[in-house]
Image (spheres, helix red, strand yellow):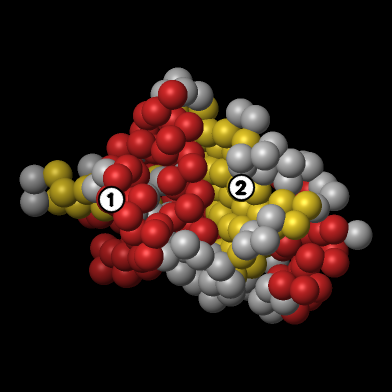
Amino acid sequence: MEREIRVKGRTVLYRIVPGKWAVVVKEDNVMIDNYHHGYPHIQPDRETIKINDVCGVVEIVVRHIERYGKVKLDKLREELCR
Amino acid sequence: MQIKFVRKVRAEELVKEFERKYGSLERLERYLKDHPDDYVALMDYEDWKHFIANPDVEVEEGEIIVTDISFLTPQKLQILEAIKKYRPRSIRELAEKVGRDVKNVYLDVKELERVGLIELRNEGRAKRAELKYNEVIIAI
C-alpha cells in the first residue's frame, strides 16, 4: 500500500480479515495479532494476551499511547496480559 | 484525541496494492528474511498468503492517529466532504465547490495527500482528488 499517514503522533494500524486480525503501531514497531495459532499474542515472543477482541486491543493500545506518548512495551504487555 | 480512518476493501484489491508495494510474494519473503521485525511487512505477508486462497473476503483496515485535532481544520474537512459529495474533476472545480481560492485549496489538498487521506490522479492537465477511506471518525 502506498498509503502513509504521517502526522504528529503515533499511528495504530489494524486489519480485520474474517477469523484473523492484527494491530501494529508503526513508529514503535509493535505488533499484536492472532495469526498462525489463532490465539492472540504480542510479538516478538508471541506471549499470549488475555483479550481476543481487536477493538479491545486497539482501545488499550490507543489509551496507552495517549498516556505515555509512545509504546512502553513492558507496560503495554502488563496491560494486555493481566 | 484520536482520528480513525477506516476503509473496507476486497482482498483482491489489497493483493494489487501488495504487488505495487513489494513486487511479488517471493520478493516480500526475501525482504522479511533480512527484516524479520518489520511488522507491517509481516502482516502484509501473512495476509497476502491468506488472500490468495480467499480472494473474495472483505477486509476492514483502519489507521488511528493519536494526535491533536489541529491537523484537521474545518477547511480541510470541508474539502474532504466536497470531494465525496461532488467528485470534482480538478482542483479548480474543487475550489469552486468550497468557495475558496484555488491556491489555498491546492495547499490543503497537497497536505491531505501527504498524510495519505486523499490521492491525486492526473486527468489530462488537471489533477483529480479522490478519497482513500470510507469513514473518518474523531474520538475525544
Give residue A21's position: percent from left, percent from top. 63, 41
Q: Which mark is residue B27?
A: 1
Give residue B95's position: percent from left, percent from top. 31, 55
Q: Say if B14 sits above or below A14 in the image.
A: above
**Residue B78 visible to the viewer:** no
Give residue A7's position: percent from left, percent from top. 50, 71
Give residue B60's position: percent from left, percent from top. 56, 37
Amino acid on which the number 2 mark rests in the picture:
Ala
Q: CA distance from mark 2 to mark 1?
A: 22 Å
The residue wearing badge 2 is A22
* Pointer 2 chain: A
Identity of the residue furthest to the right in this view: A82
Foreground pick, B126 / B26: B26
Q: Secondary structure at mark 2?
A: strand
Which residue does the image show at 43% across and 35% down from the upper left?
A: B49
Which residue does the image show at 16% across and 49% down from the upper left?
A: B122
Q: Secondary structure at mark 1?
A: helix
Asked if labels 2 and 1 share a chain, the reply is no
Amino acid on which the number 1 mark rests in the picture:
Arg
Q: Which mark is residue B84?
A: none
Q: Say if B51 sits above or below B3 in the image.
A: above
Foreground pick, A22 / B53: B53
Q: Considering the image in quadrants, where does the C terminus of chain A appear?
A: bottom right
